Image (tube, rainbow, N blue to C red):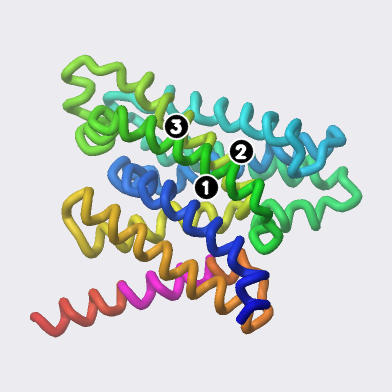
Amino acid sequence: MSEFLQLMLKPFIACLILTGIHAYLGLHVIERGVIFVDLALAQVAAFGATLGFALGFSLHSREGYWLSLGFTLIGAAILAMTRLRKQRVPQEAFIGIVYAVAAAASILVLSRAPEGGEELKELLVGHLLFIGWPEILKIGILYSIIGMVHWRFRKPFLFISQEPEQAFARGMKVRWWDFLFYGTFGFVVTSSVEVAGVLLVFSFLIVPAVCAVLLAQTVGRRLVIGWAVGALTSILGVTSSYFMDLPTGATVVCAFGIVLLALTGTQFASKSGSQ
């Protein structure tokens, strides 16, 4: 047990911190109907990291982080500008284009690197197992600050997410609010990708939020359910990765898939039984 705690306590604490901010942001993503925005911004952050690597910076260097953040904020600006009152083209189309171009650009950059395959793998699954306390403290402080920003501006953020047409009709500066939302989102994604990789960041964002929407109606209850799902799945994934000797990040992603499958199966069975 002492060996288990020594090895897996830090990854578990990191998962809890990721759950705290991503489950909340995921509710906004579900309301906005931009399901893959996190995946797109995560891939843009990954492209910034790969470009930094090609320029001679390590994936986890300070220079690489700021370069990655810069590209993510550019991606946030693009997403904010593509939010129109009358959407002739669904915003999800632009999100998909951003993801595809960033992914392709990352592959092109890493194809010139002698260890490109290993770097690409780390960008996908992160280094969750080897995270240290200083890094945990850093993301904990950063996400707390971003959480306070979102609490301060929770009303316009939520109103724009739930009622975009009315927000435009009331004369709200929707694009500016969107840039603030996606910009803070970008800070979270850049830091999370560095720790957990693209796949796990997407799972933390979407799966708890989807489970919460299936089980509750109000924002408060959905947030509590999302946090609970994220925490319990983290326990399941981290524990399984230890006892089955599997990569931690990938195991937690699969655990999210299993939990969502079990929940949707239960929901389907209960509805079928009531008919």
The span picked out in magenta is 253-263
Q: Position of residue 15 (x, y in %)?
A: 52, 59
Which amino acid, mark 1?
Leu
Residue at the extreme right of the image, as rendered: 114
The first of marks 2 and 3 along the sequence is 2
Q: Are marks 3 and 1 in contact (CB under 8 Å)?
A: no
Q: Secondary structure at mark 2?
A: helix
Q: Is residue 189 magenta?
A: no
Q: Is residue 24 above or below residue 76?
A: below
Of badges 2 and 3, nearer the viewer stands: 3
Query: 251 or 120, which lies in front?
Result: 251
Q: Is residue 251 above or below residue 189?
A: below
Q: Position of residue 170 (x, y in %)?
A: 17, 18
- The quadrant in which residue 271 appears is bottom left
Residue at the extreme left of the image, as rendered: 275
**Any mark on residue 39, and which?**
1
Which amino acid, mark 3?
Tyr
Residue in view at x 40 percent, y 48 percent: 35
Q: Position of residue 231 (x, y in %)?
A: 42, 64
Q: Main secondary structure of the magenta part?
A: helix
Q: Are marks 2 and 1 in contact (CB under 8 Å)?
A: no
**Any mark on residue 182, and which?**
3
Q: Is residue 151 above or below residue 231?
A: above
**Any mark on residue 44, and which?**
2
Kindly report the distance in space between the C-alpha atoms of the residues bearing marks 2 and 1: 9 Å
**Any mark on residue 213, and which?**
none
Residue in view at x 60 percent, y 50 percent: 136
Q: Is residue 259 magenta?
A: yes
In the picture, which quadrant includes the N terminus?
bottom right
Residue in view at x 47 percent, y 32 percent: 184
Of badges 3 and 1, nearer the viewer stands: 3
